[in-house]
């Protein structure tokens, strides 16, 4: 009985003391935290794609992508996506589902596992296989065989690097 009275008194005192916490401290803590949005696109979503063989003037018969309507609705909208950095040349990068050793170029994945990146402003210097999250404008491509199926324009790094 004595122990339960002590526990109740301790709880009462604890609640009483915490009720005097400075409200401005609570508000400033909430404001100062930086949150990164969860990915709006996933590699699984991008992998839900079909292909149709069509004639191409320069390449003969080519597999053209048929992008699903869910992804088409995201065209020109801001998306958040995570993946591994793969260098394309001295100035361009792509975001990949896989690390460089098992990416699309090595023949171990399809073209839907990579996304072209056009950075907002100057292109940052990035290391191969760096895992990061970018935010930018989604641009799917079903017609231009010289471009990626998926692109992120005006991209900014929001996590990683």
Image (cartoon, grey):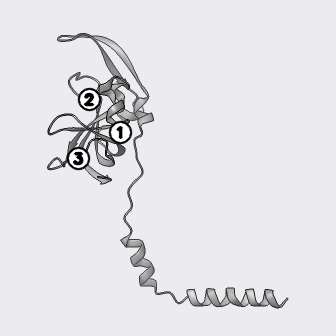
Residue 49, x across and y down, in percent: 41, 25
Q: Residue at x 80, y 88 (%)?
A: 3
Q: CA distance from mark 3 to mark 2?
A: 20 Å
Q: Which residue is mark 1?
A: 74
Q: Which residue is mark 2?
A: 148
Q: CA distance from mark 3 to mark 1?
A: 27 Å
Q: Is residue 75 above or below residue 145?
A: below
In the picture, the quarter occupied by the N terminus is bottom right
Q: Is residue 66 above or below residue 1?
A: above
How many numbered discs? 3
Q: Is residue 41 above or below residue 36?
A: above
Residue 60, x across and y down, in percent: 23, 8
Q: Quadrant of residue 143?
A: top left
Of label 2 and label 1, which has the lower sequence position? 1
SS of the residue under disc 2: loop
Q: Residue at x 37, y 18 (%)?
A: 51
Mark whose residue sits in front, 3 or 2: 3
Of label 3 and label 2, which has the lower sequence position? 3
Q: Residue furthest right?
A: 1
Q: Which residue is mark 3?
A: 126
């Amino acid at each position: 009985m004595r122990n339960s009275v002590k526990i109740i008194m301790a709880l009462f005192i604890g609640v009483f003391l915490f009720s005097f916490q400075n409200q401005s401290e609570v508000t400033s803590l909430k404001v100062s935290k930086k949150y990164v949005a969860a990915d709006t696109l996933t590699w699984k979503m991008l992998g839900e794609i079909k292909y149709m063989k069509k004639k191409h003037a320069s390449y003969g018969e080519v597999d053209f992508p048929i992008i699903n309507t869910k992804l088409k609705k995201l065209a020109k909208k801001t998306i958040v996506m995570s993946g591994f950095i793969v260098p394309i040349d001295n100035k361009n990068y792509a975001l990949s589902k896989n690390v460089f050793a098992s990416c699309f170029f090595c023949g171990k994945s399809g073209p839907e596992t990579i996304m072209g990146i056009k950075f907002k402003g100057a292109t940052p210097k990035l290391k191969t296989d760096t895992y990061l999250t970018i935010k930018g404008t989604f641009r799917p491509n079903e017609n231009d065989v010289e471009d990626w199926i998926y692109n992120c324009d005006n991209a900014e790094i929001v996590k990683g690097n």
